Structure formats: structure tokens, C-alpha cells
Image (cartoon, rainbow, N blue to C red):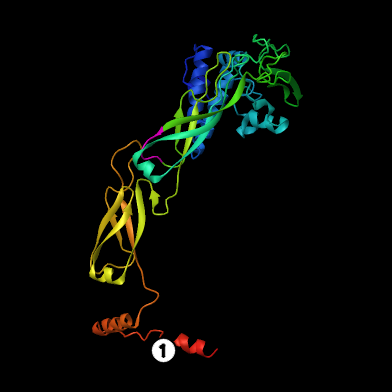
Amino acid sequence: MAGSDPYAILGVARDATPDQIKSAYRKLARQYHPDVNPNDPSAEEKFKEVSTAYAVLSDPEKKARYDQYGVTDDQAGPSGNPGDFFGGAGGFGDLFEAFFGGAGAQQSRRAGTIRDGDDIRAEAVVSLREVLDGIEKKVSYRRSVVCDTCGGMGTADRSTPPRCNECNGRGVVTAVKQTFIGSIRTQTACPKCRGEGFTVPNPCGSCQGQGVVPKSEELFVSVPVGVESGQTLRVSGRGSEGIRGGTPGDLYVVLHVADDSRFEREGRNLATQADISFAQAALGDTILIDGLSGQLEINIEPGTQPGDTFRIKGEGLPRLGGGSRGDLFVQLNLVVPKKISDAEAALLREFAELRGETVPKGAGKGGFFEKIFKKR
């Protein structure tokens, strides 16, 4: 985060309270989480930037150091200027990671017994017709809910878990490593409490001290018209439950639009194909094709050529959330019969003769293929 202002990244004032900082971080982290933006590589970088800013402002020591010097230990090179070590080729953080495997990049977990619930990802499949009309879709998923036995405390007697005496409730421990560039202080998750900040000496038998238990859930979500595969619906507060006063997470439903063998989709427009005979192409006709809302009538003009495409306005899909529909494009395929009768063949030869075309001999008696197979 060299050269970046964590306050500006999170959008908070310098006198913001810890709760305000946390609230801003949660909002941005959910907005830029990679699972919510699977097709946006820039979102992952923004998510990392937001997480790094929160790692600074949520740590009292790092925050005080930044407020006083404008950098923290893991922001500055040996001269105190961000990113200027070895000519700015990656900065101090990259050098540290090369020597120590990235241990310094770990973000300490929130200290204390309060724990926010995790966000949950679920998936739902919708049809093209449901994209056209919108639908209430049932989603099945699993989330963590507060344990009824211990009330979310994780302890057998429902008491508040004691603070970890190894890390004094911070969830991280500090170590100093000596390197050729001097002393480097690192923070890692406390091995005793595994970063929780507290221990549970008398765990609840139902949740084994976790404070939550898994539960299967079903929920109807409103899928708006016009959705595309990969788009995500957020249902606030329906993720895993928080414990000891923690905020519940959110449910993110990733939508997948099922393939329809009749149509190809490109945004709001649809494409399909229809078969016609030579007689229909030459003389013209009226045919029926399948549309999303029902059958549609198409007028075939005389002299229509194979591959000609018709555009039917307003028979595609609507914009996301509603609005005007796109168009349906219909490509015509000329179907040539594989077998014809003698009478039909005679009429076709007569047709060719009337048009002054070469009269086809065909592959009947005395034809090329018959002669070949007759020799066998």
C-alpha cells in the first residue's frame, strides 16, 4: 500500500472511530470481493487494497505509526520512503515475502470474543423464459447459526470465554527477526488461540466450542428480469450468524442462465434457426417459429435465399430490471429432401428445362454410383 492513504481508501475521516472504520471496511470488502466480481480482475486488486488499509487502521500501533509518520513498518524501505528499496522494484513488502514466505502479509483477526458471521455463496439456475419474466427462485444452502445449547458462547456453562493469555486477546503474536537490513518485526496468528483472541477451556458439547452449528436453509430470492450468467444477488443478513454480538454475514446468490437449444443469446438479443423447403423459398410462404413468449409468424418472401436472416423487433430479452426488449434474429435453412419419387424427379427436371438450366441426370438408373456398386 506504498504511497496510499488508508483513510482515503476506506473513505473515513482521520478521527473515525474503530466501529466506523470497521463498518466502512465491511461495506467495501463485500463490494469488491472476488466471488462477487468473478469477471473483474480489477476488483481483486481493489479488495486487496481495502484489506491492507483496514489492516493498518484496525491495529492501534500501526494506526498510531501511520498517523505520526505517514507510513508503517511494512510500508517503508530502509530510508523511510515507501517502495524505494532496490529502486522501487516491488518495495519492501516484496523483499520481505521473498525471505520469509509472506508471513508479514497476514492480516490479524479482530481481537475479542465478538465474531461477525461469514458471507455465504449459493447458486441458482434460471431458464431464458424466467429471464424474460423474472421469478421467485428457491435457493438451498448451508450456513452457521448460533448454537442453542451455549447461546453462541462456545462454553458449556454459557460463560464468556476468557481472554487468551498468550496474546492478551489481540489474536496475534509479535516476533523480531534479524536480517542483513536490520530488525524486522512480524505478526502472526497466535498459536494458542489460533487468532481468536480467546480460549475455551470448557467447550460446549454441541458446537465443540465454536459457538455456531451448521444448518441447511431454503430461501426464495427475487430474480429480476434481464439477468445474465455470473450476475449476483445479495441478500443482506442471510449469511452465517454472528456470535457474541457479531453482525451476521450476507448471502450472495450467483445466477446461471441455462442453455436453451432453440436460441443463442447475445446480451438482449436472441438468435434461432428455421427450416424451409425449396418451394417455400421460391414461392414464398408464412411459417410459425418458437419465440420465448409463444409461436411467432414469419412471412417468407418469394426468392428467399438459404442463410437469409429475419429480424423480429422486440422478441428478445429485456434490460436488467425491465425495459425494452431486444430483437430475435431468425436464420433460414433450406432443407433438401434426401429421397424423392419418380414423379417428383420428373417435375424437377421439367422445372430445370423450363428455366433453361442444365437438366440433372441424377443418380438413378445408369448413374455413377450405381455403376460403381454394381461392379462389386
Q: Residue at x 38, y 36 (%)?
A: 135
Looking at the rendered structure, the secondary structure element under dot 1 is loop
According to the image, label 1 marks what residue? 365
Magenta residues (range): 222-227
Location of residue 252 in the rendering, given as x and y in whole percent from the top left corner: 49, 31
Question: Around disc 1, counting alpha carbons within 10 Å, would you say few (fewer than 14), some (14 to 19), or many (20 or more)?
Answer: few
Question: Is residue 286 depicted above or below 150 in this figure?
Answer: below
Which residue is more in the foreground, 347 or 11? 347
Left or right side of 336 for 34: right
Residue 70 seen in this snapshot: no
Residue 328 seen in this snapshot: yes
Location of residue 42 in the rendering, given as x and y in whole percent from the top left corner: 50, 36
**Does the magenta portion include 224?**
yes
Question: Is residue 138 depicted above or below 357 in this figure?
Answer: above
- Dominant SS of magenta comes to loop
Quadrant for the N terminus, please.
top right
Q: Residue at x 38, y 46 (%)?
A: 267
Left or right side of 143 for 260: left
Location of residue 92 in the rendering, given as x and y in whole percent from the top left corner: 65, 28
Which residue is more in the foreground, 33 or 3? 33
**Residue type marked 1:** Lys
